């Protein structure tokens, strides 16, 4: 999905934001030769790891330290740079003005504690060390 968004042409400038539902594409497409064999390409191959999935309906253990870290993250962060907003907002038809990004040591420590490279809490995006 991210690659698709990145390849989208620059939308025309408009004073009003329109939200539209994407049309369904019912055409049939062939898989690439590597896809047929199940071959991973480049970074995908390096980054693929198995992780335990929580059972349906289960609640993960939240330690007081994790809860405190998440509460602290909710209180700060930096807004998305204007250039990022200008690129993504017209493509998604959404206003990202309230999104806050966290890249500091608290975000990295919290991400590591839940075995994540990044995570979201509401409108906050926290990145682990080296994730961006």
Image (spheres, rainbow, N blue to C red):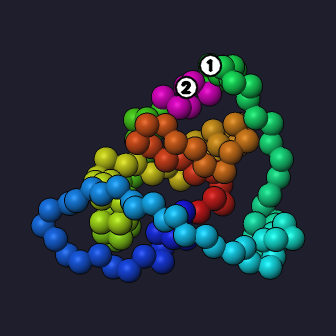
Mark-to-mark CA distance, 1 and 2:
6 Å
- Which x, y percent locates residue 38? 84, 66
User: Which residue is painted at 40% across and 48% down in the image?
Assistant: 100
Q: Nearer the viewer, residue 84 or 22?
A: 22
- Left or right: 15 with respect to 3? left
The quadrant holding residue 55 is top right
Can the viewer see residue 23? yes
- Left or right: 5 with respect to 54? left
The quadrant holding residue 23 is bottom left
Residue beneath label 2, please?
68
- Left or right: 70 with respect to 95? right
Specify whether residue 47 is painted magenta.
Answer: no
The quadrant holding residue 83 is bottom left
Q: Circle 2 sits in a helix, a strand or a loop, which is it?
A: helix
- Which x, y percent locates residue 20? 30, 57
- Which x, y percent locates residue 94? 30, 54
Range covered by the magenta-colored residues: 66-71
Q: Nearer the viewer, residue 115 or 88?
A: 88
Farthest left residue? 15
Q: Is residue 91 above or below residue 67?
A: below
Q: Circle 1 sits in a helix, a strand or a loop, which is it?
A: helix
Quadrant containing the C terminus is: bottom right
User: Which residue is painted at 87% across and 70% down in the image?
Assistant: 37
Residue beneath label 1, please?
64
Can the viewer see residue 42? no
**Secondary structure mainly formed by the magenta segment:** helix
């Amino acid at each position: 999905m991210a690659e698709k968004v990145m390849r989208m042409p620059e939308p025309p400038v408009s004073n009003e934001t329109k939200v539209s539902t994407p049309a369904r594409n019912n055409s049939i497409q062939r898989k690439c030769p590597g896809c047929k064999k199940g071959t991973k390409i480049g970074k995908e191959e390096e980054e693929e790891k198995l992780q335990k999935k929580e059972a349906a309906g289960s609640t993960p253990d939240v330690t007081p330290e994790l809860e405190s870290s998440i509460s602290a993250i909710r209180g700060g962060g930096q807004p998305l740079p204007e250039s990022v907003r200008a690129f993504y907002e017209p493509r998604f038809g959404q206003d990202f003005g309230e999104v806050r990004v966290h890249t500091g040591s608290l975000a990295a420590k919290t991400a590591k504690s839940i075995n994540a490279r990044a995570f979201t809490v509401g409108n906050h995006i926290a990145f682990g060390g080296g994730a961006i």
